[in-house]
Amino acid sequence: MHRPTRRSFLGLGGSALALAFTTNLADPWTARASAGGDHPFTLGVASGDPLPDRVILWTRLAVEPLEPLGGMPYARVAVQWEIAEDEAFTRRVRHGSTWATPEFGHSVHVDAKGLRPGREYFYRFRTGGHVSPAGRTKTAPAPGSSPESLRLAFASCALWQDGYYTAYRHLAEEEPDVVLHLGDYIYEYGIVPTGGNRRTPVPEQFRVQCDTLDRFRVQYGLYKSDPDLQAAHQRAPWIVTWDDHEVLDNWAGQHGPGGEVSEQDYLVIRANAFRAYWENLPIRVPPVQGPDARIHRRFTFGDLAEFNVLDTRQYRDDQVCGDGQQVGCEERLTPGRQMLGAEQEKWLLDGLGRSGAKWNVLAQQIALMQLDYDPSPAQRLSMDLWDGYKSAKDRLLTGMTEREVSNPVVLTGDIHYNLAGELKANFDDPASATVGVEFVGTSISSGGNGNPATGLPPGGSDPVNPHLRFSSYQRGYVSCEVTRSQWRADFRAVAYVDRPGAPVSTRASLVTLDGVPGLQAL
Amino acid sequence: MRNLTGALAVVTAAAALLASPGASATAQDPAPAPAESGPPSVPSVKVRPGTSKGTGELTPIAGADRLLAPLGVDAACPAKIDIGMRSDARKPAYADLFVEIGEPLTASRSMLSSYLPPGHELAAKLLVAVPPGTPEGEYGLRLRAGRKTLAVPVEVVTPDRLPNGGNLALRRPVTASSQHTNANYPPCSVADGDVSSNGWAGGNGWNDATSRRWPDTVDVALGGVKQVSRVDLYTLDTERYPASSVGLRDWDVQTGLDGQWQTVAQVRGNVAGSVRSDFAPVRADAVRIVALASNGANDYTRIIEVEVR
């Protein structure tokens, strides 16, 4: 996966880039003193939601990232932006000015339009004489075009105190066409002052769990201060969705955690969580104004691939049988239970039915394939996963079959485990039809170092979950090369996360062929 | 070759801080990270609905007229007060409250921002730290929202002068055999005057670090020789984490005098959230809880508060 890249240049960070600008006389934005003490671009830059003609450009001003307003004045600040075809910014194609306002945590979301499809761009911001690092992004291919290939990576679950984001760094170095983030980008948990596995001190105010907007903002400030995460944003456009920990552990629809947290408390927390999420990610949805925010959306990459980005949290019915892993929970079978909510489910199936794409992707959070956790004949299933919403799962799988959806591929996060499996018409009958494949990507850091000795070797067979083709309990991400004939997934694993600098290697490579649902190990 | 279930089972069991049955919240993800990071803690924000006057005003509010901030206590257990605001707007909005505190005291937040529906009151915790050497006396805490400012005096006092309602352990130094560090479980929280299980893992209770190893001990120094005849122990007990699943089951109450310890009461088979132990009056300069077993997975000691009378 290693190609000669501009990594050596981009990898130097903001101040070195500013120096590079000053040597370029054609550069209209020659910076002065960008490495000064009040540098407002401490949270990096990002791009996201690429369309054929536009992409979201993001930054958030913060001179003190761990302060609620990032150490910025309670006033709006003018920010200039530009996007160019070259990283020296000599062929600038669009530029403009916008406001970073305290109401939105001094975040900036620019929808840079008028771009050409399927090509690389470079962007940066400027405010008050400070120039941001330059980011690399890429637009989606033209509508109706027939791209030969697409390189993507997907990731999830990055609990800060569990370890370093080395996996994000390796992901960045691949410079994929697009990165899909499937949730648990942050965790709402409090952080002890000793900083957990990172052994990096954090201020006392991080002890308490996220609930108010100011607290969520400093949590994002901490997470987004990480240089490896910044690199991953800086080198590819991201398409993001949330899972549970952007709000509260295992929240479900209108249902909070219960106990002392009333529904009113929960909806206020959710409104704060959603707002902070919007502020901190390069996403093309209207600014969040309360506890309801639609983020499910669709991206089309010519006729090669279409991505349905799902929200499996906001509209679901509550977990049954007390949540957790359960044996013999009949309620999980109740007809009519919702995982996506009726509106999103219809939107998804209608879209899949209309799609002209070769690969039809569900970018979502929780395992769709059946996962039986009990080695004995008893079935022990997780009530939080699609298994706990059996009727919704059946409607989805049957709906895809009825619509003869071309090559369904499900991308999943949530469980901190690498898994590759085949989606079966009936998971209890190994002889039933295979209707698609699922790749579950492990966590970036959540869970700590992991254990390379566990799991199912690629191509192996698991007697309890016969549809499974691979598993491993390590940290990392998944890198995919999508062509017209096959989808190849490389499960990339880092050796450790409790200290920086771990090497990365490919634990397994699995392939699914166009028109042949199923998985083969390479 | 190991199958998936074997691998998952090993990892999950090894990592569960709260094991089943109380662990449904942590075991529901097959992955161990949420468990390793502690059980989901409880957010501190509380919302109370009401009727908006429609004036558009924001009003700062506080949970008390004044705050007593003890001097010389562990920084992990600062003084706490609820602060927040009420909205008399017509529409929901994100609102900001600004916090100013007199030096050298420090506050856990400089502002509080939150979504706030009209007519609603919202409160969240403000932690006030008193640096060592702070002179006793009154300090200012100002809460500003919209055009209104609320002043809440903060009185810095030594624990000797703290009204303790007869609880000799209140705000006294606490030491424990170990402390779990993946969330916030400071030993001093067992003498912070808060007996509710709200905010578990967020600083309102002690969880030891030695899973399935017993005994665990937590000592409270009483600040001098006192006559003692009663100890109340509060263990973790919420709807989601009932004492019968995760609370302390067996323990000895010991009193100490000049480093000599004697057992004055024993509790066995407890499933309740709090237990009162009475014993013949004894002179003591310290009280120790010797934790011997917990319910459910029998994994950890979880104590919310220890009161001594």
Image (cartoon, coloured by chain):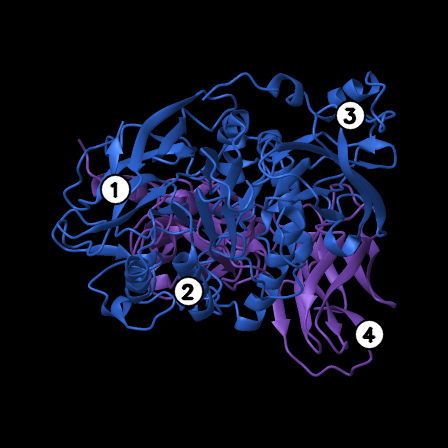
Chain colours: A blue, B purple
The alpha-carbon separation of the residues under discs 3 and 1 comes to 47 Å
Residue assigned mark 1: A516
The residue under label 2 is A345
Residue at the disc numbered 4: B57
Judging from the image, what secondary structure is the residue with disc 3 in? loop
| Circle 1: residue type | Val
**Type of amino acid at the residue the image marks with label 3:** Thr
Q: Between B36 and A297, which is closer to the camera in this rendering?
A: A297
- The x, y position of residue B253, in whole percent, is 40, 54
Q: Nearer the viewer, mark 1 or mark 2?
A: 1
Q: Secondary structure at mark 4?
A: loop
> Could you tell me which residue is drawn at 37 percent across and 62 percent down?
B243
Q: Do pointers 3 and 2 mark residues of a single chain?
A: yes
Measured in 3D between alpha carbons, the distance from the residue under mark 1 to the one under mark 2, in whole angstroms, is 25 Å
Say if labels 1 and 2 share a chain: yes
| Foreground pick, B165 / B236 | B236
Residue A367: x, y in percent? 34, 50
Q: Is residue B209 visible?
A: yes
- Chain to which mark 1 belongs: A
Kindly indicate whether the residues beneath marks 4 and 3 are on one polypeptide chain.
Answer: no
